[in-house]
């Protein structure tokens, strides 16, 4: 166990949820957060180490992150969620309950509601096969869309833990560990691409779109009807932003699509209005399960999810968000 990573993540989470964070609080919350029993001296030594490196400041027993500490903590949080955090999620019965109720009661899979899944099923029905789902995660959405559309889907993801879960749950679908930044490796194997809430994580959005177009072009059959790419993409802003940047051809993905492809190649569907219901529903459900996360010693998952969900719900309430489904016609790829 890398105690440095655990303490950094816990400290960042506590500072978001509490007005005053002390070394004692970090120790007291460590086991409920992660289900790990660590002696207090080890926690305090790690906090002293973080302070000596200039990542935190400690005044009157009150902890805070420095500017450099916030940067390091943010990077660590992202990495942690994909590795240690995912392992905690896999062993958490409460998190499974959250995901089950999220789908069963709210009709949400990932960030998609029923309306968006209807759009995706219809679009995939017009795609050249096989279809590669980029950033498939645990395969839940891949499976639903494959079953409902009757199309041949495969999935890639960078997380081996997610892929192991996907393969065990949906053995009839092929899942591969692969980076979205290295799509040219797929050569002629892919007929079209699906990317739902995954393109935020690529190193170069423009390069990835160009790679997708090049691969689809190689596979393109004589019939060029239908779509070569289907994507769902959200944009979130801050107070005072230029809201023109939320429009379909002004956000990061839309702007690149308009640059690469002619206007006749592109279609979009607006799902912005449904996002507030998605995030608000998630937040209500998480709050109902808070005590269960603590009893299970997986409180990290509650606060990790809750901090993100409450922020997103507030952004949507302030109408600083947009969400669009995009389709690129195969003939123009």
Image (tube, rainbow, N blue to C red):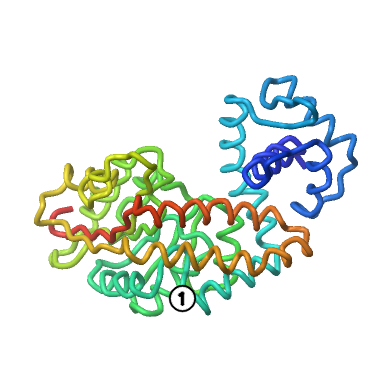
Percent of width and height locating residue 209: 28, 47
As displayed, is residue 72 above or below residue 107?
above
Q: Residue at x 73, y 32 (%)?
A: 63
**Disc 1 element:** loop
Q: Which residue is rendered at x = 18% and y = 44% of the image?
A: 260
In-front residue for pair 29/164: 29
Q: How far from the left and from the top, in percent, is residue 227?
A: 21, 63
* Quadrant of the frame with the N terminus: top right
Q: Position of residue 17 (x, y in %)?
A: 65, 47
Which residue is depicted at the point 70% across and 69% down? Answer: 93
Q: Residues within 10 Å of mark 1 (few under 14, many from 20)?
A: some
Image position of 204 with respect to 55: above or below: below
State the image coordinates of residue 169 (x, y, percent, origin top left).
57, 72
Q: Is residue 172 left or right of residue 120?
A: right
Query: Label 1: which residue?
Result: 107
Q: Give the total of numbered labels.
A: 1
Q: Nearer the viewer, residue 165 or 235?
A: 235
Instruction: Find residue 272 and report its image quarter.
Output: bottom left
Q: Quadrant of residue 268?
A: bottom left
């Amino acid at each position: 166990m890398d105690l440095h990573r655990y303490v950094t993540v816990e400290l960042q989470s506590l500072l978001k949820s509490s007005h005053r964070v002390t070394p004692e609080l970090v120790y007291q919350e460590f086991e409920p957060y992660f289900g790990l029993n660590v002696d207090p001296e080890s926690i305090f030594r790690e906090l002293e180490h973080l302070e000596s490196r200039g990542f935190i400041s400690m005044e009157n027993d009150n902890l805070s992150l420095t500017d450099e500490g916030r940067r390091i903590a943010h990077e660590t949080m992202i990495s942690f969620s994909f590795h240690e955090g995912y392992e905690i999620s896999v062993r958490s019965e409460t998190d499974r309950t959250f995901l089950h109720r999220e789908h069963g009661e709210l009709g949400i899979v990932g960030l998609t509601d029923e309306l968006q899944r209807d759009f995706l099923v219809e679009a995939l029905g017009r795609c050249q096969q096989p279809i590669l789902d980029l950033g498939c995660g645990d395969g839940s959405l891949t499976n639903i869309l494959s079953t409902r559309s009757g199309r041949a889907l495969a999935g890639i993801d960078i997380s081996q833990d997610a892929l192991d879960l996907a393969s065990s749950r949906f053995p009839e679908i092929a899942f591969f560990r692969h980076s979205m930044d290295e799509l040219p490796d797929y050569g002629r194997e892919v007929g079209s691409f699906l990317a739902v809430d995954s393109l935020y994580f690529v190193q170069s959005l423009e390069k990835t779109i160009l790679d997708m177009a090049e691969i689809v072009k190689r596979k393109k059959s004589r019939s060029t009807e239908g779509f070569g790419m289907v994507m769902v993409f959200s944009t979130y802003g801050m107070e005072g932003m230029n809201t023109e940047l939320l429009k379909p051809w002004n956000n990061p993905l839309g702007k690149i699509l308009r640059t690469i492809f002619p206007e006749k190649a592109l279609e979009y569907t607006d799902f912005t209005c449904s996002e507030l219901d998605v995030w608000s529903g998630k937040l209500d459900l998480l709050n109902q399960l808070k005590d269960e996360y603590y009893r299970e010693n997986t409180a990290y998952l509650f606060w990790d999810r809750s901090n993100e969900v409450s922020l997103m719900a507030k952004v949507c309430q302030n109408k600083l968000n947009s969400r669009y489904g995009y389709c690129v016609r195969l003939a123009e790829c």
